[in-house]
Structure formats: C-alpha cells, structure tokens
Amino acid sequence: MTVHLHWFLPTGGDGRTLVDRHAYTDGGIKRSRITPVSGVRAPDIEYLAQIAKAAEQLGFEAVLTPTGTWCEDAWLTTAALAQHTERLKFLVAFRPGVISPVLAAQMAATYQRITRGRLLLNVVTGGDSTEQRRFGDHLDHDRRYARTAEFLSVVRGVWGGRPYDFEGEHFRIEGGLTALPPDPLPEIFFGGSSAAAGPVAAEHADVYLTWGEPPEQVREKIDWIRGLAEERGRSVRFGIRLHTISRDSAREAWSVADRLLSDLDPETIAAAQQALGRSESVGQQRMLALHGAGSVDREKLEISPNLWAGVGLVRGGAGTALVGSHADVADRIEEYHDLGIEHFVLSGYPHLEEAYWFGEGVTPELAARGLLPRIPVSPLRAVPATNGRPASAPGGAPLLVGGTGR
C-alpha cells in the first residue's frame, strides 16, 4: 500500500500568517469592495494556477479545494485550473444540502469528460448551522447526515446509466438519470466524527477522511469506521488532513511554528476560540480539545511527536501540523501509514512555498522508504553539462565569463 499525496488550494486567500488571509478586508460580510491587504495573496486564477502547477510538478496527485462563504466556488475554480494542468486531479468539496443530487451527478459526469477523469469528490455535510443557513439549509446536525446518506444513494443510483427512482425523507426522484455516466466514477471522500456520521461513511465513502489527531486517536477512528463498513459488506480506505512545516532541520521548522505563534495576540485567539466553540461539529470539538483551551505554550501545543496544534488556535477545520525536519515529517507520515492511512491531504502557509518545502524535502524521503511509487522527475535532470555549465542548466548553455576582452 503506497501513499497518495494531495495538496490544498487556498481559494479564500493565502499569506504568511494564520490570520487575515482573506481577500475581503471586512471579512466578506459587507462585500462592499476588495481592498489590498499587506501580505495577503488574493485567490485569483493566476496565483492559484501557480500552486496547482507546482503541486503537479512536485508529484502531488490532487489538490483539495474547499467550500464555504469565504471561498471561491470549488467547481468553477477547479474547472478553470484544469486548463492550466495536465495530470493533477481536483478534490472538489461541496455541500450536498444545497444542490440536487441528480444535478451533482450530472456535473460530476461532465467534469470527468472535460478533464479526462481528474475529479475526486469531497462531501461536506456541514457542522456550523450559521454557515448552513447562509445557503438556505435549516436542518439540524443529525438530519443533515441523514440527508447526505440519501443524497449519495441517489448520486450512485443515477450513475448507473438507467432511470432511477428514489423516495426518502429528503429526496423524491422519479426517473433520475445521468445519460452519460462518468468514466471513471469519481472517488468519494467523506469525513465526520459523530455517531450520525459513522454509518454514512461506512455505507457510501470510498475514502474516510479524518483531521490530524494523534496516532492513537486516529487508530480508534479507523477501527470504528472499518467495523461499521464490514457490517455492511464494504471496505473503506482512509485519509488524513494535516498542515506541514518541513525544513532542512528540526530547529528551522520549529522556528517557523514559533513565528506563526508570535503573530497571534491573546484577543485574536480568544475570539477565534469562542467562535469555534459554537460549532456543532464533533470533529471540530475534538480539534479544540487538543490544544489546551487556547494555550500558546509550545510544549503543550506539541500534542504528539512532531504534531503541533497551533493552527487550531485560530483556524477552523484541520488544526494540526506536522513540524520537523524532512525526515521527522516522513517518520510521522510513515507512522500514520502503518495505521492504515493511504491519503494525506496537506497544506501550509503560504501554500506555494510550503508545497516546495514538502515536495523537495519530504517526498524523496518517502520514496526512499518505498512509500511512493516514484520520485517526481525534474525536467532538468540528466541534462548533460556543456562548457563548464552545471548539469542542471537548461540545454547545457555556456557560462558567460567576462574579463579577457578577446
């Protein structure tokens, strides 16, 4: 079992800190204007294309594109980025409560054809009622998961290529059909830590995705979902969502983590913790429990070897990062892999630079350990040296040497 590496597209904005990364300076509430902010990189297609191209060149299999109020639409953005890449897949996040399942199935089929099979689907049921209501969804937490189960039943049903009928609590479909089903069928990634989420994952997910908890907690989740799937005669693969800070030495990596902490003042942390504490998501509550109620003590934030909970002080969702030398980070990935994790969905601030740190540092380590099928080949590798030019120079072009006048 080899490792599948994925990166992240920051479609809400990017930057060098954990806060103030969004293109909207007022948080997007007024939507009166987009104003440049120092250090913030707007999620325009040119910048996102840089990240996508870097991810492809560095050997990442796919990029996760989020969904939400503060993000550009994942379907439209990635369809555009597919024109800037050749092999990179797109793990498109979407909410099943705000779109017809038959329309979603049709969109996925079209997407597969125009990208030649580069779609993966990340189903986000939603753990924040305020966010859900912005999109017209007023169901409570457990009913949202019940609706997701029906949604995925319909999607898979209409992908069968024949008229499909379905009658449930949330959807009633008569003759639902995807005239040209997607080929291949997109893999479905799904996450959720609540009692309501587990059976849905076991019944419908191809890959169960967890946030980056310590290995023992991840092992418990894997055992839980695997047992539920076996009861249904299915098997599920597993993935994990983590940030990374990888450097040539552990000291360098931890200095970056310390700098990210130094950018956070107590008021910012307190406000973020209060907002995140209102989330209905069990997974979010598990993330909050990892960092000791907003502690900024580095010793307390390293909750497991090389697993740092500092991101979760101010960011929702994935709140932990692998921090250390390239070998340290590879060690931790290997540890999770030994538990049964195949898919690693990674990110870092800023996403362009951190993709290179990981891809040029950790990826070769993983390949040397047999966890990757191959090391991505540089387009400059094996170019012969000419006229004293290093072999890495394109075409072996001659050096310009001054001074003789001849």
Image (cartoon, rainbow, N blue to C red):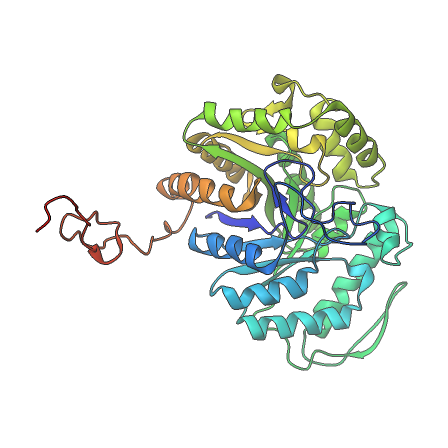
Instruction: Determine the image quadrant of residue 33.
Output: bottom right
Q: Residue at x 74, y 62 (%)?
A: 152
In-image side of 320 versus 145 (left or right): left
Placement of 308 over or under 169, stated as above or below? above
In the displayed image of the protein, which residue is found farthest to the left? Answer: 406
Please tell me which residue lies in front, 399 or 346.
399
Picture mark count? 0
Asked whether, in this view, residue 240 is left or right of residue 358, the answer is: right
Provide residue 238's location: percent of width, then percent of height. Answer: 60, 47
- Quadrant location of residue 227? top right
Looking at the image, which is closer to me, 279 or 221?
A: 279
How far across and down, in percent of the image, does residue 385 sit?
Answer: 17, 51
Does residue 316 sit above or below 147 in this rendering?
above
Q: Residue furthest front?
A: 405
User: Which residue is found at the position 66% from the left and 66% from the top?
Assistant: 76
Residue toward you, 283 or 88 = 88
Q: Is residue 183 visible?
A: no
Residue 312 x, y percent position in the rendering: 69, 33
Q: Give percent across and percent down for residue 272.
A: 78, 33
Q: Is residue 180 above or below residue 39?
A: below
In the image, residue 342 above or below residue 164:
above
| Side of 242 relative to 129 (left or right) | left
User: Which of the two residues, 53 or 152, is positioned nearer the viewer here?
Assistant: 53
Residue drawn 45% across and 35% down?
330
Whether residue 16 is visible: yes
Q: Quadrant of residue 204?
A: bottom right
